[in-house]
């Protein structure tokens, strides 16, 4: 399979790799939302951790990905896009934008879906931890 | 000598044609271009000479007489001719009936054996599909346990093409001879690399292929035993009655000549090649096992050919691993079919979990593999696995002592 230059660049130099601590550490922290999603198509797994301020701004983002090059690139790109954004802004990111930016072929669309889902899932986790009604995220998810 | 990239480590898929083979073929394109079946002129006689010399070379490699070698287009055709040809010849009932005879094979055969057997199943034959144990080796005992009074054919590959394991072939052959059952073996990954003697090894039908042993593509052979027992086959391709009626069609003279030469070169260089490949493979496996954690060499520890290594790397995904070692041409345990990566049916049947099956590499080396290339591969794979593990959430969980297989992911 031929990969676009952007995919190769993200694969070789992924941005914002890492985590804010072990799974136990981050579970206990209220300022961090964790999303772990899996793709049933291929068994690939993406983990996104967001550090979010009281004002709802995503101050930092870290990802880890067990997946193909396109999944790695999608999640790396997603962290670039959401850093510094508000929760509401981050929730407007669609996988189709990722597909376009990385020139993903049709068989790799689900890899970008994984990235979009991990954003939603991490934000939902943050909202749950903080007792915020996740009305928006959930109604969005329901609408899909 | 400087290392030239990319490096070729997919010799189980096909090999580079030996330049000496090409040289032997050349006159048969432009000078001795006759039809080997033309009996009336020197062009035909020259072509026939070439074909018969090659038959002698092929027969010598396997300890057969040249009359027992039938030319085909490759192992796929040889397997089809052997399995369908023998089943239909020795069928216990006419077409359209059931219980036409029992055939034993195993689930990790090449598709070129599985699919003919499936077709025979639809044609009224009973097939026993043996599942191998975790080490991948099919033993004499497993065949003995599957035998029935109506068994007419056993087809077990000599070496598995994905994991390189060696089945108990002389033993299975001997058992079949004791019971008067025809024994076919797909020896595509064995012949030319390992010593073969169809008499000693009790083989009735044996397939092998030119392009796996440094000959040209599109040529193969089927050994068909002529004495004790004399094996007869129903042809699949009918026509001019070439190859003793078992395979009609004007012979691919250039290909056959090249295949013959390739057989001869294999016989001459076999012992030295085998030793060299064995030590290269040992180094590759040993180094990867010692430099990386959670690495598994698939298949039996010792019963494996020197040219195939199949290695799984835990907690890295196969496709991204291949992307990281793009200068190494090799096969992955996943066959990419459209959207999903299917883990190989061979690894799956050994009970290797999807995760490890997805992240496995088949590295197969050959006549031109150098130690420098092995060293390059070791380093490139180590680096890529480490890069991907640094990215892998599953690796973190594993390091935290969490059993990844027990986690239920939130899926979309
Ligand atoms: C074990 C085995 N059988 C059969 C084949 C098919 O051989 P050919 O390409 O000559 O048809 C191969 C090669 O892919 C093989 O490895
Ligand atoms: S995430 Fe499944 S193939 Fe890319």
Image: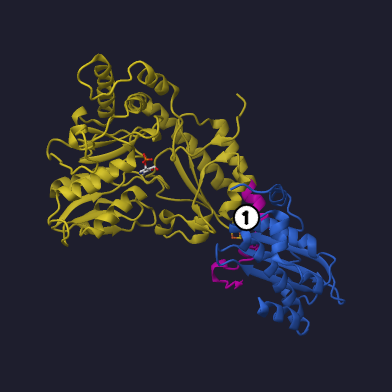
Chain colours: A blue, B yellow
> Count of labels shown?
1
Q: Main secondary structure of the magenta part?
A: helix
> Foreground residue, A30 or B398?
A30
A74 w.r.t. B379: above or below: below
Report the span colored magenta.
Answer: B384-412
- The image quadrant of residue A139 is bottom right
Q: Secondary structure at mark 1?
A: loop
- The N terminus of chain B sits in image quarter: top right
Q: Is residue B411 visible?
A: yes
Quarter of the image where ligand 1 sits: top left
List x then y, in percent, for residue B263: 33, 27
Q: Residue at x 60, y 58 (%)?
A: A106
The question of residue B14 being in magenta is answered with no
List the residue tagged with mark 1: A105
Examine the image and state in which quarter residue A43 appears: bottom right
Q: Residues within 10 Å of mark 1 (few under 14, many from 20)?
A: some
Residue B243 lies, in percent from the top left, at 21, 32
The image shows residue B6 at horizontal and vertical percentages of 59, 35
């Amino acid at each position: 399979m031929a990969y676009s230059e952007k995919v190769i660049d993200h694969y070789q130099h992924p941005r914002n790799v890492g985590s804010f601590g072990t799974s136990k550490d981050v579970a206990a922290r209220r300022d961090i939302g964790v999303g772990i999603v899996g793709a049933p198509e291929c068994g690939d797994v993406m983990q996104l951790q967001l550090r979010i301020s009281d004002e709802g701004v995503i101050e930092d983002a870290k990802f880890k990905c067990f997946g193909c090059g396109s999944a790695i690139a999608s999640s790396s790109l997603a962290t670039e896009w959401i850093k510094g954004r508000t929760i509401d802004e981050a929730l407007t990111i669609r996988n189709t934008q990722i597909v376009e930016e990385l020139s993903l072929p049709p068989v790799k669309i689900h890899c970008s879906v994984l990235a979009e889902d991990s954003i939603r899932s991490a934000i939902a986790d943050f909202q749950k931890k903080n007792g915020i009604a996740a009305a928006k995220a959930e109604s969005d998810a329901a609408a899909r | 000598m400087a290392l030239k990239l990319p490096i070729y480590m997919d010799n189980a898929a096909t090999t580079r044609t030996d330049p000496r083979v090409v040289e032997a073929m050349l006159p048969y394109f432009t000078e001795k271009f006759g039809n080997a079946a033309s009996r009336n002129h020197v062009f035909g006689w020259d072509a026939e000479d070439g074909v018969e010399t090659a038959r002698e070379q092929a027969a010598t490699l396997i300890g057969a007489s040249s009359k027992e070698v039938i030319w085909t287009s490759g192992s796929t055709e040889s397997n089809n001719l052997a399995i369908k040809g023998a089943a239909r010849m020795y069928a216990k009932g006419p077409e359209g009936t059931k219980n036409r005879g029992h055939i034993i094979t195993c689930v990790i055969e090449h598709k070129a054996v599985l699919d003919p057997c499936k077709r025979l199943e639809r044609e009224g034959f009973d097939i026993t599909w043996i599942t191998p144990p975790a080490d991948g080796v099919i033993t004499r005992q497993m065949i003995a346990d599957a035998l029935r009074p109506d068994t007419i054919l056993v087809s077990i590959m000599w070496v598995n093409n994905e994991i390189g394991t060696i089945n108990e072939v002389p033993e299975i052959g001997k058992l079949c001879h004791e019971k008067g059952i025809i024994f076919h073996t797909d020896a595509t990954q064995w012949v030319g690399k390992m010593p073969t003697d169809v008499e000693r090894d009790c083989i009735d039908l044996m397939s092998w292929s030119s392009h796996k042993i440094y000959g040209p593509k599109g040529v193969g052979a089927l050994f068909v035993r002529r004495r004790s027992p004399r094996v007869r086959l129903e042809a699949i391709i009918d026509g001019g009655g070439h190859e003793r009626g078992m395979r009609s069609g004007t012979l691919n003279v250039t290909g056959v000549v090249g295949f013959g030469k390739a057989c001869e070169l294999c016989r001459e260089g076999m012992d030295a090649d085998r030793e060299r490949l064995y030590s290269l493979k040992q180094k590759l496996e040993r180094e990867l096992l010692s430099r990386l954690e959670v690495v598994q060499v698939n298949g039996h520890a010792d019963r494996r050919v020197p040219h195939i290594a199949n290695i799984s790397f835990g907690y890295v995904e196969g496709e991204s691993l291949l992307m990281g070692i793009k200068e190494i041409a090799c096969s992955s345990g996943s066959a990419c079919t459209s959207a999903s990566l299917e883990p190989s049916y061979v690894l799956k049947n050994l009970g290797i979990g999807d995760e490890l099956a997805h992240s496995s590499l088949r590295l197969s080396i050959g006549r031109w593999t150098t130690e420098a290339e092995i060293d390059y591969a070791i380093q490139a794979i180590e680096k890529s696995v480490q890069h991907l593990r640094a990215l892998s959430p599953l690796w973190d969980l594993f390091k935290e002592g969490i059993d990844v297989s027990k986690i239920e992911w939130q899926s979309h």
